[in-house]
Amino acid sequence: MLREDSYQHHSSPSQLEASAREGCEFCAVLFHGLVTHYTNDNSFGLLPLWRGKWNESPVFLTPVRDDREIYTPGMELTAGCWNGGRYRDSPFVLVHLSESYASLGSLAAEDHNTGSPASMKLASTWLATCLRDHADCRLAAADFPPYFPKRVIDVNPFDGSNDIRLFTQAAGNSEVTPVAHPYVTLSHCWGTQQIITTTIDSIESHHRRIEWQKLSKTFQDAIIVTRSLGFKYIWIDSLCIIQDSVEDWETQSAVMGGIYRRSVLTISAAKAKNGSEGCFVERDGKSIRPVRLQSCFGEQTDGQRSHVECRLQDPANGQRVWVARINVNFASGPLYNRAWVYQEQALARRSLIFGEECMHWECPALVASENEPVGSMHRFDGLQLPLLEFGKLLNSFTRGGAIAGQLDVGGKSLQDFWYTHVAAYSGRAITKLTDRLPALSGLAFNISKSFDDNTYAAGLWVADLPRGLLWTRGNKGLAGSGPGMRVRPPLVFVGPSWSWVSMTGCHTTYDLMLRETRSPSAVLDDGLNLVAVDSILKSPNPFGEVLASTITLTGRLIPVNVLKQGRAYILLEEGNNVGELDLDDEETLSGIIWVLATVHNRDACYTISIALIEYKTVAREAREHRRVGVAYVKAHAFRQCGLETIRIV
């Protein structure tokens, strides 16, 4: 907001725009930041600037500071004006840029899209800095053996053309190689449009040549980036996996996480919803990049300051101070809605992201963009992005061989950290429902190496199964999908009813479980005991698709009736209200359901329970049940209850 130390930079937004068009780089950055901050669709509910009131108010610069008399690197300021009865402003930050970053300004005239020479030079600078200086991102050769995918794309031009070709190792199926060939990977949306793929019929011709004009725009742009950064090889899923070979797909999808994990860099086509849209976006580089400021830029009247004289000082580098527009959002785009991409993002050691407005960089040590090339983390004190945090965690596993019982991740156990990722992943869209477990298998494999007991069952860890069963459906369905529903035969089998993977069209969360089990008065039911886990896998990959999975438990189980009252489901025992049910989906229940005691809250006198219905009566030692939800049940309801063995499908 406007304060006494605000300084009038221009008499109106129109004047600011005119100055930008006349070549003032500082005004260009301010104008672009102010306009896009209020016209982009974002989560802040900001109203667009009203062009009809364009000349209503001067444009002010306001320092965000603690009574300091000089502007120094790291200090924030806002540019704003009154518009449509509201004060609108956009945040900027003063930064010091080293010579390697500052020299990029000389290429601004050619900087018309995110594939420009200036953008590629910045990408090279980020990569070189990370490889040289980031201890959090480096892994010793002893900890990270040389690795090379079975197939890659060789992007070196040949025959005087732009064409590329598929390269397959002569060593058959062995991806571990004594020679470490550096390669990059591509993360992209396939979309609904047909893109070029490698098939049983086309693989031999692809070894000889893949014609440039047959590649999608996204593939072409990714290859341009690969060549610009000096790499010979790129891994692209549709070209490096034989798409009509079930055997090859199952084998390669099982190691896909390792392919992304071992690549030097992942190129992310974040803005493109299909292959025709490409990586690059047109924009004015001069309005995106930081600009150098003079040592003094305040207005003066008869030798007196009109508001405040904006003096700059950088003790280490004299007058080299730059202003950069702050990114209030991280990289975003259609790519971030796709389930398969989640593990690609989490496992990538470094990501070069082509977003909807500019290019971004993410690695465990740095989050940056063309707006803020030296990093954005100062804007998020105490916040660790889950995916970047996961990258740091994997690096620590690789170096030290830590085990889950010895780890604390931001105040949470490693299992809790997994549940956080499950919740984020579950909300992403996937074309083939049976891919929900395969698309997370790389993440599961990497984290499994840090558990004492790494037995995995349909998205849950057996060592923490009682807590893992306590997922709930999120309040909101996914966009365009309607309310959440359980996927089950005869539609298709995705996972057992006791696993979050059986739900689709909604987020599944562990908020209830994490809140309840972190309470000092919470305790697992002492009668709950896992007897067996029986799973039938589709492939040898233990983290991949399951065809069937059953758990056998011993625990306290009571029958209750369900009464729907408005939107609530009340649980009755002999006519008495003993609890409330949170249904997994909107199925109609009639007759008796069963509740299995799981976590007791001793102070509040209630029990978090798994709600079940009898699936079928079979001549076996244990009755079979199917999960229908999670319930709060009054603790006294279980006092006279003995132990029973049941099977949940």
Image (cartoon, rainbow, N blue to C red):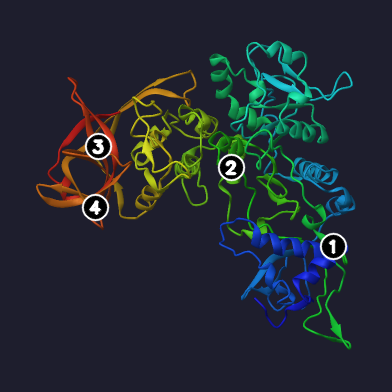
What kind of residue is marked 4?
Tyr
Q: Earlier in the sequence, mark 2 or mark 4?
A: 2
Q: Label 1, on which residue?
A: 21
Crowd around label 4: few <14 · some 14–19 · many ≥20 (10 Å)? many
What kind of residue is marked 3?
Leu
Q: Secondary structure at mark 1?
A: helix
Q: For the point 62% across and 20% down, which residue is it?
A: 241
Whole-number angstrom distance, CA of label 4 to CA of label 1: 67 Å
Q: Secondary structure at mark 3?
A: strand
What kind of residue is marked 2?
Tyr
Crowd around label 2: few <14 · some 14–19 · many ≥20 (10 Å)? many
Mark nearest the camera among 1 and 3 is 1
Q: Label 3, on which residue?
A: 612
Q: Earlier in the sequence, mark 4 or mark 3?
A: 4
- The count of marks equals 4
Q: Earlier in the sequence, mark 3 or mark 2?
A: 2
Quadrant in the rendering for residue 63: bottom right
Residue 590 position in % (x across, y down): 18, 39
Whole-number angstrom distance, CA of label 3 to CA of label 2: 35 Å
Whole-number angstrom distance, CA of label 4 to CA of label 3: 18 Å
Residue extending farthest to the left is 574
Residue 393 position in % (x across, y down): 58, 42
Q: Secondary structure at mark 4?
A: strand
**Would you say 36 lies left or right of 552 here?**
right
Mark nearest the camera among 4 and 3 is 3
Q: In the rendered view, tell whether residue 39 sits above or below residue 616.
A: below
Mark nearest the camera among 4 and 1 is 1
Viewer-side residue, 196 vs 93? 196
- Label number found at residue 606: 4
Q: Earlier in the sequence, mark 1 or mark 3?
A: 1
- Label number found at residue 336: 2
